[in-house]
Every structure is written in structure tokens, then in C-alpha cells.
Amino acid sequence: MTEPPSRPPEKASAKTQQKRPELRVRPTAPILPPSNIQGSALMVVISIMAFLACLTLGGVSMVRSTAASWESQISREITIQIKPDDNLDMEKALTQARDLALTFVGTKSGQIVDEAATARLLEPWLGPGLDLKDLPVPRLVIITIDESNPPDFDSMRALLKESIPQATLDDHRTWVDRLVSMAHTTVMIGTGILLLVFTAMVLTVVFATRGALSGNRHVVEVLHFVGAESSFVATEFQKHFLKISLKGSAIGSALAALFFASAGFWQSRTLATPETDQATALFGTFSVGVLGYAGIFATMIVIALLTTFTARLTVMRTIYEIDTLRSDPTRTDGIGS
């Protein structure tokens, strides 16, 4: 007796099929809170230090460019000075000195400074309306030279002294040496200030990182207990301090760039005034140029990277001390709880 064929199992329709509940993964949160009092204070400190570093860098760049401009102007010219004498025809002596200087290879042109121009040079000290005939004021001859092929100054000086005993030659080498020394000294001082600023910033980040670790010590210990590697914890702290350092250094660098731009704009709008003339004489033009702004941006990046690198090293060192203290609780040189 054959069994009746079994009925095929009915396929459950899609409408009646029960859906499994979806698993929702709880969003992960960073180890450190994104914003707290310590982070805000550290960002302010980094902003101030970035501003000082960029200000120092821009100031050094500005002084160097001004010194280079002075050096270039001085090295392109030499000056012949002729002292007045009772038996000397001044105008003839000036012309003779100019012609003698132009006979040397390496000279380009010569200009006699007339009495009106000489009076204008002495006006800040002796006042207006000066009569040069009443004072034994020397007269000047300015000779433009070829910087790449300068003339023989010793031979020119000897020939002038032989032809015109009252004439002296100034090749400005003393002034050029002083300007070069001043530029080098300025660079050394600026470099020292930058190193001090970076050192203070590194120490600040070290203490801030240790404070953050101290406040979140239980989090670090729990992560160690569940098997989190030290590199993972260090990376989380590194990300946290990278955001803070980028914000802080960007604010400080932007303020420094705004300061130089505002100072340059003010200087361009107040030309030919006593205040601007004095500031220009002391500091040159308040313009750092494209390279200066590029240096400010590079300083911002360096500060951010240095802060991040310092935070990572501090975290790794602190975690090592925690592990050392856990392995040997009798030690007292680790991090206290």
C-alpha cells in the first residue's frame, strides 16, 4: 500500500515572516570630552604662544629685510667729503673730485650735492634758513659704483688726497659691517625667543596632558584591563590635543598676521608724518611679504605638530609609569592615584 504523497511545505510569505529586531550599536564617544576647562585653558595658552612666536618671526623677517635694504643702498654708493678752506675753490674742487673718481673702473656716475640739498640734510639739527657760508660745513660728492666690480678704493683715496688735500673718501665698509652684525644679532635674538616660546609651550602641554590623564586615570585603567593597547590610548589623546593645538595656533597666527596687515595699512595711510617717519626709521616698513606670511603659516603647523608629538610622548610615558606601578605597588616613583 503506497503512502499518499506528502504535501510540500508552504512557503511563508514575506508579509507574515517575522523580522528580526535590528541591532543598534551605541555610538562611541571619545576617551576625553571634546571640550572642558583644561582644554579651553590650553587652547588659550597655545594661542598666546603662537601669537608671540609669529610676532617674533615677523619682526625678525622685517628687520632683516630692512637691514638688507640699507646694506644694498650703502654698498652701491661711496661718498667724497671735502672740507672748506680759505684757499680752496669749493665748486672747482667738487668737480675735480667727481671727475677723478669717475676715471676708475667700477664707477658708474657721480653727483655733487649742492648747497640747497646740504642745507636740507642739516635742517633737522640746525633748523631752516641755514646759510652755509657762515659755517664750515663740508660738501659731498656721491659716486655710484658697480657692486659686482667695485673700484680700487685705496688707489682712489690716495689720488684724491694727493690732488685735493681737503678731500676724504668714505666707502661705507664700516657701516656695512655694522649692519651685517646687527642683522646677525637680531636673528640670534629672535631665534632665542622662538626657542623659549616653544620650550614653554612643550612644558605647558606636558603638564596639561598629565592633568588630563590624572583626571581620566580610571578610564585608562579600564581600557588597560579590557586589553586596549597603549598605542590606542595614546592615539586618542593625540587626536584630542591635535584639535586643541590646531585651533589655538590658528587663532594666534591669524592675530599675528592681522597685526602686521593692520600696521602696514596704517603706515601706508599716514606717510610723511613724524610718527610714521620715526617708526619707519626704527623698524622699517611693517610689511613681512609673502614669505613672512608663509613663515607664519609654517609656524602654526609646527606648533600644532609639536604639541601633538609632545602629548603622545607624555601619554606613552605616563602609561608606562602606570604599568610599572601596577607591577610593583611598593614603588613610589610612579603616578599616584
Image (cartoon, rainbow, N blue to C red):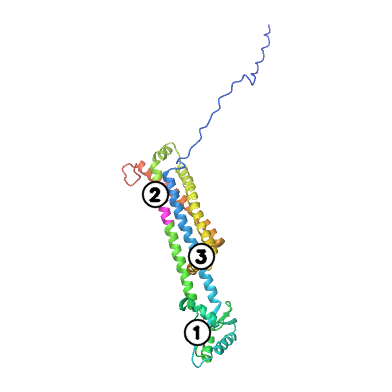
The residue at which mark 2 appears reads as: 207
- What's the residue at 49%, 45% (across, down)? 239
Crowding at label 3, few (<14), some or many (≥20) Cα neighbours within 10 Å? many
Which percent across, then down, holds residue 62? 51, 65
Separation of residues labelled 1 and 2 (CA atoms): 69 Å
Separation of residues labelled 3 and 2 (CA atoms): 34 Å
Q: Is residue 25 above or below residue 200?
A: above
Q: Give the number of the disc on residue 62.
A: 3
- Magenta region, residue range: 198-210
Mark earlier in primary sequence (1, 3): 3
Which label sits in the foreground, 1 or 2? 1
> Tag 2: residue type?
Phe
> Tag 3: residue type?
Met
The residue at which mark 1 appears reads as: 132
Is 100 or 91 nearer to us in this picture?
91
Mark earlier in primary sequence (1, 2): 1
Mark earlier in primary sequence (3, 2): 3
Q: Which element type, helix, strand or loop, lies under badge 1?
A: helix
Question: Image quarter for residue 19?
Answer: top right
Crowding at label 1, few (<14), some or many (≥20) Cα neighbours within 10 Å? some
Q: Which element type, helix, strand or loop, lies under badge 2?
A: helix
- What's the residue at 48%, 86% (across, down)? 134
